[in-house]
Image (tube, rainbow, N blue to C red):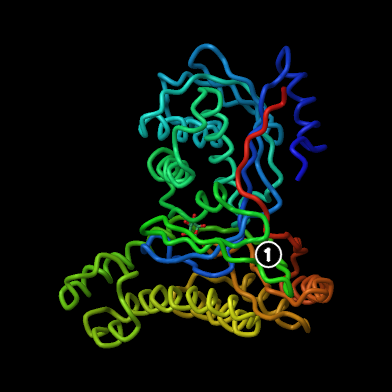
Amino acid sequence: MQPIDKRTEEIQAEFAKVFDGSPTHVAIAPGRVNLIGEHTDYNDGFVLPVALDRDVRVIFRPRNDRRVRLYALEFDTWADFDLDALAFDEEVFWANYTMGVAWALEEAGVKLRGLEGVVSGNIPRGSGLSSSAGLEISNALALLAAAGKSEALTGPQIAQAAQRAENHFVGVNCGIMDQFISTLGEEGYALLIDCRSLDYQRVPFPDGASLVIGNTKASRSLANSAYNERRAQCEEGVARLQSALPEITALRDVTSAQLEAHKGLLSPIVYRRCRHVVGENERVMGTVAALAAGDLEEVGRLMNASHESLRDDYEVSSEALDAMVAAMRSALGCLGARLTGAGFGGCAVALVRKGQERAVRDAIFENYSKSMNIWPEVYTPPASAGARLFSLE
Ligand code: GLA
């Protein structure tokens, strides 16, 4: 990407309308799509996401005081607060992400300064593509830069601060995946992230394949409470398994063989939740091995198995997601397809043989809209870069 492209210029023009003078920087942070490794991050497990070519960006300049004034273009609302008086905003919900990130950065020991700017994003919102992580990470980079502290934290530390903001300020109990890939994604690569150690490894996106994302456009009602319930069931599973396996601290430490040997300790429902997580970690490692071997059929098979497990054992799919996955798989050239993100609605992702993107796209519009009576959206994103900061001066 060119450092300063047309979209940045347009947002810059908005800045000039809202504030006097010129901005000094643009901070950009993308959304993500997860190839495989769903509901594993908060179990200390493995994930394999890709950063999208859609992002949230903040065009800003520092202030000499501790006031933050951000205007959100798409919402036409303001986050306007003092860094010394952070309080949950009931009215402007997105402002809590900005405040939360400021709070978490200062908790991490970084003394911030104020800034003023314009925020704008093109990640579909509420679709499971992590527009909130894009907002958090772009805001974090902007706040750090305005304070002259861009080097104060590492990428993983920035991601952790943003996750804390979401957990403790906004009140959403997410894992680390979305903030991590938004911060550290790289063009042409997926990242294999170890969500326990926060070590990560670049995995080249295969030459012979493309991603096709199908947005069900179906609402994600109850997603938050069901997500928290799944987390609690995983914790219950660990607590019960510990009586036989005292060395484990998370489902990440349990193998399929161990789970089978001790399934009598678990209620049927908790057993199935654990079986998803344990199997999904194994599938992530299998996917990485298959990509290294150039075996795209195997990658597709594992993605399909992931969807089946999320649907039957973890129970986070929905009629719309199943219809989307079926529509994707009906097309020649679809290697595998699964729901991506938390589930309950939002998007599915397909790995598609290069050159067959169109066929999959057509199959989605034809078959998904017929079965659900909803007009979907389709994206074919390349594996894109993570967050970045540019000077505008
Ligand atoms: C949401 C959360 C992530 C992760 C996924 C499920 O996207 O924000 O942390 O738990 O769901 O894999």
Q: Is disc 1 placed on a helix, strand or loop?
A: loop
Q: If the image is split into quadrants, where does the C terminus sit?
A: top right
Q: Is residue 195 above or below residue 299?
A: above
Apparent side of residue 262 relative to residue 43 in the rendered image (left or right): left
Q: Is residue 1 above or below residue 25?
A: below
Residue 371 relative to residue 293: left or right: right
Locate residue 192, reporting x and y percent: 51, 64
Q: Sort mark 1 into few (<14), some (14-19) or many (20+) by Cα contacts within 10 Å.
A: many
Q: Is mark 1 within 8 Å of ligand 1?
A: no
What residue would you read off at disc 1?
Answer: 216
Image coords of residue 167 (percent x, y): 40, 45
Q: How many marks?
A: 1
Q: Find residue 376 and report its horizontal and vertical position in percent.
A: 75, 63
Residue at 54 percent across and 36 percent down: it is 93
Q: Amino acid at mark 1?
A: Thr
Residue pictured at 77% horizontal, 25% vertical:
14
- As displayed, is residue 273 above or below residue 173? below
Residue 59 picture location, percent across and down: 68, 28
Q: Name the residue: 50% across, 79% down.
A: 286
Above or below, 111 against 51 in this view is above
The foreground one among 73 and 60 is 60
Q: Quadrant of residue 334?
A: bottom right
Q: The N terminus appears in which quarter of the rendering?
A: top right
Quadrant in the rendering for residue 211? bottom right
